[in-house]
Amino acid sequence: MVGKTASRGQAVTERDDLLASIANTIRDYRAGEIMEPTPSHVDRWISQFDGDAQVPMLRELDFVFKRTYVSKIKAQQLLETIVAGFPCDFWRAAHILDIQEQGSSQSEILRILSIALKEKCGSDIEYEGSTGGAFVYLDDAIFTGNRVVQDISNWMRIVAPKGAQVYIMTIAAHESGRYWINVNKNMNDLKLQKQINVRMRCFNGFIFESRRAYRNQSDVLWPIAGVYDSESFQPRIPQKTVSRVFSSEQGRQFLEREFLNSGLKIQGFASYPSPMLKPLGFSPFGPGFGSLFVTFRNCPNNCPLALWYGDPSSYPENHPLGRWYPLFPRKGYSL
């Protein structure tokens, strides 16, 4: 009896410690826009999962978020690294693009960039640049690559001068998105017509494998056979070497199962869900994109639905958005 009591006490202590640790990791999420995440907030979210799953999920997510969550301070450090990769003359001549058609990530990242540039070069940089200067498209991350392709293609079609040098710079990138940017026919046709050279630069520590051909070495949630099966989906085969994102193959598979099941539940809340609304995040393929990369600014919809879906504070319980409490309340494009 004493042993059981001690074991239960240890479990409670571990749970409390994990709640506090995760809350501390994500404490600046949307700071100034929403209430600061607390252990109680994390507890309310995890309590939506089966009781036996909660501590193992917290244990794995505590490990994962320490590797995939980017705080504002970390974002500043990473942007300083990007800025340091080019001389001040490059930045003084560069045209810093603010052409994102959806969302506000670019504008917010540019504000941080301006601070990094001032510290490196000692004065404010004129974003208009000068003749012959490179064009810089800066954002926090590349996921599917669709947003970058759309933004850059529209800009090249209408505005870009012939022979322009374009740099796509991001804090993070998923390999499937980088691949799509490189092979997109519409974008390549425009590059050829206007003789435009496009280069991508990303902080190496935040490049995540997400290509189907490399699914066994992927850094995103990619279920194994028996967890999610369909004719068009190619499951992942577990490897001896575990992705740096996860603590272990066991911990990874646990997250994949729990996020898949919770995502299917959330899908069922809506009478006519979007075909892109997949359990593991927005994607036209399989169970979803499966990214676990989140920044202080927002949670991408390419992450599992269970992380960001829902808004019980604004919708009644019988509304689809009122039936799930998110860990990362998401700021949509309309806000």
Image (cartoon, rainbow, N blue to C red):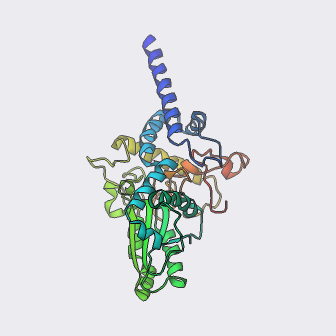
Closest to the observer, 241 or 274:
241
Image location (x, y in percent) of residue 246: 37, 45
Closest to the observer, 120 or 248:
120
Image location (x, y in percent) of residue 253: 39, 45
- Toward the front, the furthest residue is 122
> Quadrant of the rendered structure where residue 65 is?
top left
Image location (x, y in percent) of residue 36: 61, 41
Image location (x, y in percent) of residue 217: 31, 55
Quadrant position of the C terminus in the picture: bottom right
In-image side of 324 versus 245 (left or right)? right
Say above or below: 323 vs 159. above
Q: Could you tell me how many numbered marks the image carries?
A: 0
Say above or below: 327 vs 220. above
In-image side of 174 versus 272 (left or right)? left
- Toward the top, the furthest residue is 2
Query: Which residue lies at the image location 31% right of the left edge and 53% below the top edge?
Result: 237
| Residue 173 appears in the figure | no
- Toward the left, the furthest residue is 240
| Residue 9 appears in the figure | yes
